[in-house]
């Protein structure tokens, strides 16, 4: 039960005494970077930012806050796409930054595991793995800022899911500070362990609403010794899917990424990004395929050329550019990676992170593009993303000449239009970004009934006071 | 709340009216096969076996039982190694067989998914996948009897975990009948779907204590086009691990199975199994390595020979036999697969399904063998299993000439001795078999504190009446 005697000022004093000046920020300038989300959709307030330097300090701080009934908002790199890591406008929610818990506790190239703390930046985790000759494969746009705690709490996906799975699949064990301040040490580095409920899978993807992930045992992989990247103009969406299938059937283990891009998006890249030259301009549909293997003699180049030749003969691939060096491969990847920035420079856009069964991806792209064009004539669909996972960022750019604000005022109509198609195709309204605050209102409609009821029962069982990241994931 | 007015006979009448004679067994002869577990560790009683022919009938039967406060024991192929699927001796627990829910609802070689009902036998699922040119990779000794519902409820492992993961990793979505008779349809066939808590992962591995898995979306894979099997005499446990590492580093995607066997176990095979000839007798340690690839030109034979040659030069591999045909490869696998039977024919044995970090496997085998020999001089360690996962079946055969009953009376001492080593190495007391009834008493010691407390809170949240598979997994 909350202790009503403990006023916020008394709580702040206790937190200050516990954590010291490095561990508790109250100066408005220090709070500033923690108040708004990365997309600037929300701006909240907080009385303080707690920055514990150890798991024990975090646990003690959580106990103080639980006793005071103070709501807690876990924050990693604060790169959420759905407002998942920022406090609300009420001014009572305490932001808890995991940034100082950023050690690699151990790394073992024989076990192929790394125990990393929540605040470790994803890029630093990749580098640590590389330092022992291994690969930590999770890779996404925000990897220079996003943290291990964040990518696990949101079950991040990214570019390599088709080969290595989502963040969930890269995790063997967790350490969690529970909402009552108990520490659960589940840092087991076992490939098989069937001893009761899979609690670790409950915290992964819970977006901080059930507790604080403080550390994780992560799976490592052998480093690829060979890689190939091709950028292809393809006939249409079906041809893109067919090409994916050709590669997968030939060597499913070699497909590290398979990304779709529209002619519109590639055009925006050429127009807006410095040095943004495109090797094969003028196609309506593009695919980037990235092959990799840890075999020293994988023969990926021969495989790539053989599959592309087949697909050209079938009329699916119209033209292709193969990266001849690391620099060329990076340049091809840049076309895909700069899509969000290029789109931003072109004007206002509405983002939809949706997924469907892989086989339905062409239909998703076509039908939602058409439906949006009926809704707002002149709207410019810019679908791109992870075709190999069925996860397309079904983004829509404003019509040329339309007022940006007037376009954005139609955001919900556009999202509803896309989501109607997604639902009809058996898809999901949030593929890899999660629910956060942005999509909480959609949960009742999409996951209502027995499923949402179960989630709410679990929330109450794990966090009976309802203090963890209130207003996120579950509708109020 | 249970309806105290509804007596068991009234419940039986209602179940009979709902399910008809095919759906409700009450004849003692019909109940018989459902009362004892596969290892014959337990023998229980039940008033009836419910065998619903549809999910709707199951849900209605569960609602009747919930109203009557009747405990329910889900049963698939009844091949549990830990007494997980049989009723207790009290005579009140209703056995619910999923056997009639055994359809493949759909299968899609483009999406690489299959929606299978709980009662589908694992082998039939493998065959269905093969029928569309795909692979469902889960493979284990009981595959001719075990069912999809059972292997998911126990998160079964088996021989191919090193390449394809455990049952959990092969599942994209679930349909579950909850303890109150609600049906949750989570049969999504998506590779990415971050929309709230990962409920599906809570039911997988819950051993039927949270609800009935009635159907699942399973992941399929391209069928291997090439495979190679080698049976090797190796210098010692460390050499076995080193050989695993050599293969993994060379081509981690190609290692489909990597199994360790002791000289003792291989000797029992030669002695007891009809046609049980061993190509390389006389070694103290053996390894079976199985490579497979979906590439038509994977060159696995060259890879196999190159790695074995390196390992021979390093003194790790002493001799090796390579299967030259499908029949020879099957014969090599048979040495491993007949280990349980050979061990049984040699005399009484105590089984330990344990796991450690992969790097600690040699230490596990050595230290627990030594500790057991100190406990019972002459005891014969017969470790075998999935070295590539750190999952060794650390079995102990009775000393020659010792009375079997006297040996088995020491079972708990032997298990404790092995488990002390396992714990010291950061391992698990149940790797792939689960907890069932056999290991429930160990949960407080191994998973006590915050972890077990959380599990019990979740159990109460999902199954507040405590009707699902009572006495399994969680201590009472």
Image (tube, coloured by chain):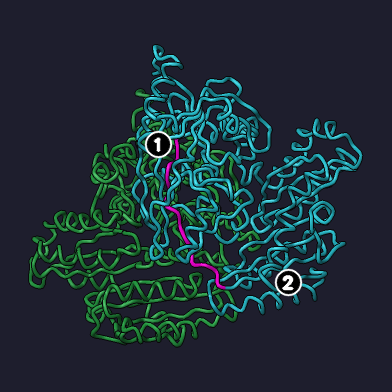
Chain colours: A green, B cyan
At numbered mark 2, what does the secondary structure look like: helix, strand or loop? strand
Q: Are marks 1 and 2 on the same chain?
A: yes
Q: Main secondary structure of the magenta part?
A: strand
Q: Quadrant of the N terminus of chain B?
A: top left
Q: Residue under circle 1?
A: B177
Q: Of residues B409 and A22, which is closer to you in this image?
A: B409
Write the start and end of the magenta stretch as one range: B211-225
Is mark 1 in CB contact (under 8 Å) with mark 2? no
Whether residue B213 is in magenta: the answer is yes
Q: Of residues A139 and B26, which is closer to you in this image?
A: B26
- Classify residue B21 as left or right of residue B406: left
Q: Quadrant of the C terminus of chain B?
A: top right
Q: Earlier in the sequence, mark 1 or mark 2?
A: 1
Picture coordinates of residue B349 (x, y %)? 79, 41
Please indicate, yes or no, whether residue A21 appears anywhere in the rendered image.
no
Classify A58 as above or below A325: above
Query: What residue sits 38% from the left and 66% below the top?
Result: B110
Q: Which mark is residue A422?
A: none
- Classify residue B460 as left or right of residue B361: left
Whether residue B31 is in magenta: the answer is no
At numbered mark 1, what does the secondary structure look like: helix, strand or loop? strand
**Spatial CA span between label 1 and label 2:** 48 Å
Q: Residue under circle 2?
A: B322
Picture coordinates of residue B444 (x, y %)? 61, 31
Picture coordinates of residue B18 (x, y %)? 37, 28
Query: What residue sits 38% from the left and 39% below the top?
Result: B54
Q: Of residues A134 and B391, which is closer to you in this image?
A: B391
Q: Of residues B450 and B366, which is closer to you in this image?
A: B366
């Amino acid at each position: 039960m909350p202790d009503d005697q403990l006023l916020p000022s008394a709580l702040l004093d206790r937190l200050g005494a516990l954590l010291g000046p490095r561990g508790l920020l109250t100066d408005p300038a220090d709070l500033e970077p923690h108040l708004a989300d990365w997309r600037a959709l929300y701006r909240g307030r907080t009385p303080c930012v707690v920055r514990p330097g150890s798991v024990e300090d975090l646990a003690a701080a959580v106990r103080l806050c639980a006793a005071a009934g103070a709501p807690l908002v876990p924050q990693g790199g604060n790169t959420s796409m759905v407002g998942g890591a920022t406090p609300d406008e009420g001014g009572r929610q305490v932001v808890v930054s995991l940034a100082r818990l950023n050690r690699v506790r151990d790394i073992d190239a024989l076990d192929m595991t790394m125990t990393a703390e929540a605040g470790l930046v994803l890029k630093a985790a990749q580098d640590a793995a590389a330092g022992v000759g291994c690969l930590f494969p999770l890779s996404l746009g925000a990897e220079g800022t996003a943290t291990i705690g964040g990518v696990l709490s949101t079950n991040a996906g990214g570019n390599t899911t088709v080969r290595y799975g989502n963040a969930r699949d890269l995790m063997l064990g967790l350490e969690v500070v529970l909402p009552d301040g108990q520490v659960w040490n589940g840092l087991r580095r076992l490939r098989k362990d069937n001893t009761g409920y899979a609690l670790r899978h409950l915290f992964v993807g819970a977006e901080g609403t059930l507790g604080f992930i403080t550390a994780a045992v992560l799976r490592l992989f052998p480093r690829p010794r060979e890689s190939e990247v091709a950028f292809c103009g393809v006939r249409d969406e079906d041809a893109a899917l067919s090409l994916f299938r050709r590669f997968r059937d030939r060597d499913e283990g070699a497909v590290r990424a398979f990304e779709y891009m529209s002619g519109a998006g590639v055009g925006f890249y050429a127009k807006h990004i410095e040095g943004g030259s495109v090797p094969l301009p003028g196609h309506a549909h593009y695919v980037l395929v990235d092959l990799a293997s840890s075999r020293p003699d994988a023969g990926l180049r021969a495989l790539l050329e053989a599959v592309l030749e087949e697909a050209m003969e079938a009329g699916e691939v119209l033209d292709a550019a193969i990266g001849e060096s690391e620099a060329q491969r990076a340049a091809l990847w840049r076309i895909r990676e700069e899509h969000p920035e290029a789109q931003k420079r072109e004007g206002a856009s509405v983002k939809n992170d949706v997924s469907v069964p892989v086989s339905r991806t062409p239909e998703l792209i076509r039908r939602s593009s058409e439906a949006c064009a009926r809704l707002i004539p002149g709207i410019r669909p810019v679908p791109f993303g992870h075709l190999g996972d069925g996860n397309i960022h079904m983004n829509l750019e404003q019509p040329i000449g339309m007022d940006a604000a007037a376009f954005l005022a139609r955001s919900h109509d556009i999202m509803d239009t896309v989501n109607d198609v997604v639902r009809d195709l058996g898809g999901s309204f949030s593929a890899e970004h999660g629910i956060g605050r942005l999509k909480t209102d959609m949960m009742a409609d999409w996951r209502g009934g027995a499923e949402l009821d179960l989630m709410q029962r679990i929330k109450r069982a794990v966090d009976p006071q309802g203090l963890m990241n209130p207003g996120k994931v579950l509708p109020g």
